[in-house]
Image (cartoon, grey):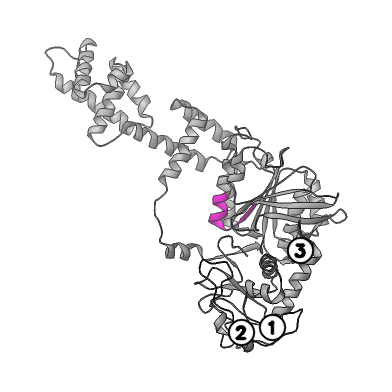
Amino acid sequence: MNNLIENAPSSLKRQLLGDFLELAGEISKDTIRPDQEQQLETEIISAALQAKMPSAALSRVAKYHGLPVDLVQSIAQDLLGERGLDLEAEEFAKAIAAVKRIEETTEDQGLREWKLQNLARQYKRSPSQLWSCYEKALVNQAVLQPLSLKEFKDQHGNAIEWLVPGWIPKATTLLLHADGGVGKTLFVYQLLAALLAGDQWNGYQLKKGSCLLVQCDEPGIVTAERMEIRGIRDTADLQILTNWQAESLPRLAKWIEAKRPDLLIIDSLTTVNKASTFSENDTEYARPLLHLRDIANDYGVTVIIIHHSNAGGSARGTRAIHNSVSEVWNMKRGETLTERILSVEKTRLGRPPGDYKFQFDEGDFTFSYLGEAHSEGDQSVATEERIRLWMSTSAGTPYAAEEVSEQLALSKNTVRKALYELWAKGLCNRKRDTKQRFYSYWVESTLWQAADLADPSDLSRSHPDHLPDHLEKPDIPMASPASPPSDPRNRKEITLEKSKNSGSSGSLAQGEAENTCPAGIQQL
């Protein structure tokens, strides 16, 4: 019946309307029928456009005149269509506006849920259906305004700012998952202490910053004791929030917008999501992570979410959890009771994927970085120091990783990793020419002061043996052959484990010396 009425021509619907009115006794054969129909049409339009609940208002009109509800609603759709309007679209817009008012004005979670349930009942939908429509409407209402590449770079910048140099960028979301008892929370607390004090974390210098700790996983007395063990002072720029739930994300966003902390720690995803109506295996369970991603991007805060691993070693729950964050780290036990392996499973801007070894000290709850899990830590440190000392002999002269590899008889991969570590620890600078895809590295010298080091890319001021004929030599394998090496007769001999000084870089005149890392993961 509904489909028959809906698909009937407008003229037939209005004929039926008149017949029903005549049967109902509202008009007689000698009455001017068109006038009565026009009056009823006016009532229908008024109910459809002016009422808060158009469907309910049309039902009342139908009941008052003794007409079928389906007929009145279908006529209303036609009448609005003649005016370029859509009855369902009008009703949808009013429903979305009502949900938005509830979200923005009702802070009490229980009362907000109550109002949403009542609203959903009025629209003959479930709360989850109404909420799904609301979220999709927000996405659709976003202004579509593409940017040119230049505008995009001007808005977002060309360089990454780091919370932990070489490990964790600012304004990103990181999920750290592990089994219970492995020490994931203690690991994050060590990072937290370094941030609050502006100290080093395993040799990587952090800028002093502030933090909001959302701790819903461990008892308050445990948190207080661990802050004491970490030496975090009462005057530290740290705020602690307990008994918080993900439903309060809008309020959290307002607080972060006002206070602008550098770091937000959430421990754990399970406890802040315990009021969720979705199972941990449902895709919708990961929805708060998408909101946290937006908060990180909008306010420049780094978000670390602590989570649990499943029996297979992956992040517990739906795969959407993994997909909704920018960085995913997994911590597990190593070969000994105190060894920990940190696996970078996913990264967009931070630490390259791989396994990194840490030693856990049960006395002071600290994690000491030992290097990559499949390499000798002491050897890696020795290689870094060897490269640093070699570059120091020509301080201020930029070198490509390939040159360092050739001169010190080390593999390119080893040199790239070592240079990355030296840069991340602040022991050397790096720079990438806008015309090249690779970085050049150099070590500062106390002998080269402001005027002499005004621009390390100015090769006329660089080391006298650093010749320009080597500048086009790529650090990353290219399709075209590399430029021929410099004439060794023009190079100065340096005796250092069979090494020659052959300073090289890309053409650096157009680049900028890097204190921060350019966007994107770079192959070192």
Residue 484: percent from left, percent from top? 56, 78
In the image, residue 171 lies in the stretch drawn in magenta? no
48 left or right of 18 in image: right
- Disc 3 residue type (three-letter): Asn
Span highlighted in magenta in the image: 293-305
Where is 354 relative to 480, above or below? above
In the picture, the quarter occupied by the C terminus is bottom right
CB contact under 8 Å: marks 2 and 1: yes
- SS category of the residue bearing label 2: loop
The residue lying at 27 percent from left, 22 percent from top is 7
CB contact under 8 Å: marks 3 and 2: no
Residue 322: percent from left, percent from top? 62, 44
Where is 408 relative to 248, above or below? below
Please tell me which residue lies in front, 312 or 56.
Answer: 312
Q: Which mark is residue 445?
A: 1
Q: Which residue is mark 3?
A: 202
**Tag 2 or tag 3, which sits nearer the N-term?**
3
- Disc 1 residue type (three-letter): Ser
In the image, residue 297 lies in the stretch drawn in magenta? yes
Q: Which residue is mark 2?
A: 453
Residue 411: percent from left, percent from top? 69, 67
Please tell me which residue lies in front, 219 or 348.
Answer: 348
CB contact under 8 Å: marks 3 and 1: no
Can residue 207 be spotted in the picture?
no
- SS category of the residue bearing label 3: loop
- SS category of the residue bearing label 1: loop
Residue 297: percent from left, percent from top? 54, 55
